[in-house]
Amino acid sequence: MTMRNLLYALVLALVFVLPISKAQAQNETDQITISLLTCTPGQELYSLFGHSAIRVQDPSKKMDVVFNFGTFNFNTPNFYLKFCRGKLKYMLSVNYYKDFKASYKREQRGIVEQELKLSQESKQKLLKALWENYRPENRYYTYDFLFNNCSTLIRDAMEQKIEGQVEFEKFGEPTQKTFWNLLDVYLKPSPWIYTGIHLILGMPCDIVATPYQYQFLPDNMLAAFDHALITQNGEKDKFVTKKQELIEETAVYKPTPWYIHPLFVFALITFIGLLLTLRSLKTKKRLVLLDVIVFGSSSLLGWLILFMWFLTDHQATGPNLNILWALPIHLPLLYSLLKKNRSSWVKPYFKYHSIFILLVIAFWALIPQDLPYTILPFVVLILIRSIYHATRS
């Protein structure tokens, strides 16, 4: 009788208890919501293009956390060298939502939330993948500005780690926009950053991007998710079920005053350089300091371009046609240029260099790279000093 009663109790458990436990687990999964968070741009370089993150809410566990792929450790040994060489490892971090929200509120930046339509299986699979990715041995990755950043990693996880298929084809039409066209929307309000990035990044940014590639920018991924469809269990539906503004952007961005705009600053430097050059033609005085500034700084930039082009892992820093006017060769030649009794080759060298720089300026808009217009006055100054040395007796 004892054995019979035990078997009877076991059957009852299989028939009643296990389905109830399974239903409870399903109800817990149903309560979980997974959202895409899109944060508005900030004024600092690292925040200039906005940010994306994943929010996970699980009321049954009183959990509300944010998975953030855009973090790195400032205490990394040789941090700046690794950053410049493209070898700095970014990582996935997990923060409490309240802390994440508070930090953006302090910066007066906005947050938009898009709740995603995911099946129970998709939620479980995605959460498992996120926590697995957060393990210390898995959380680090090689960051790439255009193709592997805080936005694209989220999109890729959505496509690869959930049940069903996400379609982004409904987002936009091919508009022949290059990566520069997309970036300049964020760069133009900060002309000095615009100038610096256009000097360092090269021809890969002149490639025409596909609408799918637009999503390397958080705002574009937000728009793509708005138009995305998901097919689950044979049914196709909108990927975003709910959209809301969690924080309104309140920061006021003041435009750069005209008198410190790089175009004006470089134009002023060129005008002063022209006046000094014209005066030196009469006084026969050599302008050693001016030549050090003009040819020294442009040459140093040329060496930096070569470093970023050939000695880093960045995909967008080379080829870089700014090297056409920022010639590295001027740095080792500077000594010969500044000697009182110049070498015989200096005059003919600058004769041909003047012709070359003149052609670069004339065809500036036709060069197959979007060179920064703000630096053009300084290139004119290089031409002025080059003509001076080509005609100096």
Image (spheres, helix red, strand yellow):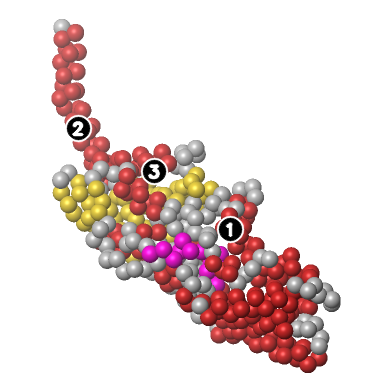
Kind of residue at disc 2: Ile
Please state the total of marks drawn on the protein image. 3
At 15% across and 10% down in the image, what residue appears? 4
> Can residue 10 be seen at all in this image of the molecule?
yes
Disc sitting over residue 239 in the figure: none
Residue nearest the observer in this picture, 285 or 191: 285
Classify mark 3: residues with Cα within 10 Å, few (<14), some (14-19) or many (20+): some
Q: What is the distance, in whole Å, between disc 1 and disc 2 at their CAs?
A: 61 Å
Residues at marks 2 and 3, CA–CA distance in whole angstroms? 28 Å
The majority secondary structure of the magenta stretch comes to helix
Q: Which residue is mark 3?
A: 130
What mark, if any, has residue 20 been given in the picture?
2
**In this rendering, the label closer to the viewer, 1 or 2:** 1
User: Could you classify mark 1 by the number of other residues whose Cα lies within 10 Å: few (under 14), some (14-19), or many (20 or more)?
Assistant: many
- The residue that disc 1 covers is 308
Q: Nearer the viewer, mark 3 or mark 1?
A: 1
